[in-house]
Amino acid sequence: MANFLKKLFRKKKPATASLPSNAATAPLSEAQLWDLGNGERPGKYIHLIAGSALDQGQRRENNEDSLLCFNGTLGAGDLATPFGMYIVADGMGGHRSGEIASETAVRALGQYLIQHLYKPLFGPDPQPADESLREIMEAAVNEAHRAVKRSAPGGGCTLTAALVVGTQLVIAHLGDSRAYMVHRDGRMEQLTKDHTLVKRLQEMGQLSEEEAADHPQKSVLYRALGQGDIVQADFFTGSLSPNSFLLLCSDGLWGFVEEDDIQTIINATTSPYLACLHLVEAANAAGGADNIAVILARLVH
Amino acid sequence: MTLSEDQPTRNLDISENATRHSQLRQGEVLQERYEIQEIVGIGGMGSVYRARDKNFKAIRLVAIKEMISQVTDPLVRKNIFQIFEREANILATLRHPSIPRIYDYFTIGERAYLVLEFIHGKNLEQLLAETSGFFPEEQVLAWAVELCDVLDYLHSHKPEPIIFRDIKPSNIMNTLQNHIALVDFGIAKVFESKQKNTMVGTQGYSPPDQYRGEATPKVDIYALGATLHHLLTLRDPQLEAPFSFGERMIGEINPNVSREFAAVVERALEYKPEDRYDSAMEMKDALINVARKTGTLLNLSIPTTVSSGAPSRGVGVKPLWTFEAEDELRSSPTYHDGTLYIGCYDNNLYAVDAANGDFKWKYATDGGIASKPAIYESNLYFGSEDKRLHVISTRSGKVVWTHYTNGPVRSSPRIAEGHVFIGSDDGSLHAVSLSSGRLAWRSEVGSPVRSTPWVGNEHIYFGSEAGDFTATDFRGDARWRFKAKRAITSSPVLQDGVVYFNSMDGTLYALDANTGWAVWRFRLGKGSICTPAIAGNMLYTGAADHIIYAIDTRSAKEMWRYTTEHQVNGSPIVHRDAVYCGSVDGSLYCLDAASGRMRWRYQTDAPITGTPVAHDDMIFIGSTDKKLYAFLA
Ligand SMILES: Nc1ncnc2c1ncn2[C@@H]1O[C@H](COP(=O)(O)OP(=O)(O)OP(=O)(O)O)[C@@H](O)[C@H]1O
Ligand SMILES: [Mg+2]
């Protein structure tokens, strides 16, 4: 009997030891989740973790950036369906219409996505949605476009929105906010293309990189939400791999902090939330000339 | 985003919420004179209404354009209204058959109104939305000449030229008499806030110089070029990157357009203003020359639909060898160790020397063979109409074992995890043990399974003729199901956690391999039984609409399409930087994988329904002309 207990104990001990010291207190901190994520855990149970930060910066009198960071994991049986919605919008236009536009965009898009994904995810008999994720996203962007035109006529905003269902990732994009995939091995892959006139002129070989860098019309967009009769967003579909961070940010971050530094900050911190704070600090340290919106998300096994 | 230093936000009373604007109602009367009938257009600054002018006994209709000021500061607003009045006065002096007359203007609160001659007709944006085929060249040419004429009139205005600034289909109306009217004068621009980040002109139609703030006649000439390009190609520039007309040559999209007309439009679209026509007058002359040269204005019967022009056939391409079977080769060969194996409708499976096409041996079943053989440890697995899965030795050509199903076997086998997986017309997927030849399990789906299963990601994926797509685990238990609207004969392909397949419902599906959620769908022109081929981020597939498509899997965007002369039922393969695909038109096509440009084409004597196979520098394909062909890649 004593032997049996000993055996049981010996088996159990290393298991307990590998858990974080305060595992009993729920919910776990981001850092603890990170630790769990780094351990080789068998099984298909995956979590989606995310952090975000929004900051006015040092020089602006108002904040025209808005963001939505919404994430969860639905575990049922031995399968988990992570579900995440991440949106960054950066407004433009006079007398508050920039603020109104970005806020409206984030709310309208979020509302549409939740409405259309709620039943398939949480309904009594969970079934994939009738439309594809991309079509839902496309319809959501159209809805947000109409909402912005209604609430902020003449104004507009950028929009970089990511939807994660399972390990699938769908991104809709307009303007010059960005989505990156930041890999653990140091590679940083820009998933979106800036819809700025200067970028386009540069692509066409009409401007050099230096000329583009301090072009007076650097931020003139040729595509934005709320502008024009129809809206034509870029879409990206791919999968979110557990070894990579999904980063969404406004030009308040990428315009002032070098990609190398962004990458170093993200990979140096254990939690997405802390990494977001550090990114905002870095943008402010670089002058904080614009509003800053950052979201980081990652799958952990 | 950056805002200019003199950003006016702070000077304004921000506690005042952005006013919500309501539209005028039917029956409402403005200035005790204009009775609103209905909305005919909605724009950025307000709406356009049709109204009746009650001062006239006879029914006189007017268009009332409403512009709502966004500015709340009374002084700024007053200033804007002054500019509005000044511009309205200028417009009121214009006299041209293509410009609606201005009758009146007035302001009410934060709204300004222009009363215009009512134009009966539709705008070109509406016509674009309604058309099912290309507009006849003569029609577009006639509109172009009239547009140049009215632009010339505006640009010659004294003392200052009037630059329209916003030429685009929705600002051009086509009258009931089939003339042109320019409806939207830049007057509304007065009401837009001059923000650094807001866009000037309409994205897609405006030239680069306009973004630099230049307003010259060349700006209107470019936008006219862009509008004509849209009308001729039906490709909306608002959906493309700016200034990318050069990537969409008119002649390549719409071969009906004369080279001369395309050249005029392309000159108007030159990137640098100095390379465009100097004036609308010069462009008009060029257009009239085109009409003369091509006789377009005389020739009234121009077809409105196109197919891609017949290219030169099989220029210089000859098969290295051919092998003739006794009946049609509808299925696809498999290469293994110097030998090609292919099933035939004469019930035989042939083994042919891949080097020279010499016959090695044949093996007879009791039915036609549509299944592509699979190889595992020197055994050959394939299905036959005789309801059996056959396993024969590649060395001897002798049977090893067979497995009976209750229906013809048209699916091709997939071998994994010690089992062979194959579908049958008996309505189920069979998993048969490789070592014993015994059935391990059957997964019933209720309709024939002709799709070849894909095994990966710890699942088995396959479609059925009733349109069900099933993912089972290795015990044969369904993990998820997806329903297409029609049959899924196409075989799935798994890559990076996504399964891709086509359906007879005319859709290419991309589903999350773990949950069956659709990530995206792509509309094909018609149904498809092809199996997609994937290389990197590009997916290639064909459909019954005669087309071979290249689709970027990350954006779900079509990168190119190539139109063959008949249905594409065989599947494409990618080998090095080329796509090889057969068509029911009888040709094997070799297309550049990046651009879709045809490199060569070889015409066989009957439809091709099978899929080619590549090995080293060789491409092999069967045709229903009974022959198996070998080509140099
Ligand atoms: N005089 C008119 N008679 C009949 N219909 C008209 C007239 N003017 C405009 N319309 C209709 O209303 C639509 C919108 O008109 P218009 O282009 O002048 O306004 P807008 O698009 O709101 O302005 P903006 O492009 O400056 O925002 C037109 O496309 C046309 O269909
Ligand atoms: Mg208009």
Image: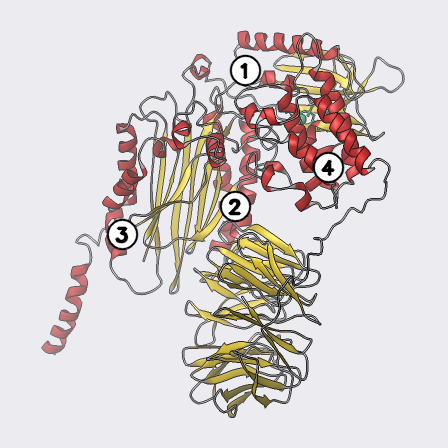
Q: Is residue B548 above or below residue A207?
A: below
Give the Cα distance between marks 1 and 3: 50 Å
Residues tagged 1 and 3 counted as in contact (Cβ below 8 A): no
Q: Quadrant of residue A191?
A: top left
Give the Cα distance between marks 2 and 4: 43 Å
* Mark 4 neighbour density, 10 Å: few (under 14) some (14–19) many (20 or more): some
Chain letter of disc 3?
Answer: A
For disc 2, the marked residue is A137
Q: Establish whether labels 1 and 3 are both on one chain.
A: no
Give the Cα distance between marks 1 and 4: 48 Å
Task: Name the mark nearer the viewer: 2 or 3.
Answer: 2
Answer with left or right where residue A130 lies relative to residue B294. Answer: left
The verdict on label 3 being within 8 Å of ligand 1 is: no
Q: Which mark is drawn over residue A33?
A: 3
Coordinates of residue B45 in the picture (x, y in percent): 62, 22
* Mark 1 neighbour density, 10 Å: few (under 14) some (14–19) many (20 or more): many
What residue type is disc 3 on? Leu
**Frontmost residue, A23 versus B571:** B571
**Frontmost residue, B242 versus A26:** B242
Give the Cα distance between marks 2 and 1: 34 Å
Q: Earlier in the sequence, mark 2 or mark 3?
A: 3
The verdict on label 1 being within 8 Å of ligand 1 is: no
Answer with left or right where residue B54 lies relative to residue A233. Answer: right
Coordinates of residue B51 in the picture (x, y in percent): 78, 21
Q: Secondary structure at mark 2?
A: helix
Give the Cα distance between marks 4 and 3: 67 Å
Coordinates of residue B123 in the picture (x, y in percent): 74, 31
Quadrant of the snapshot with the N terminus of chain B: top left
Chain letter of disc 1?
Answer: B
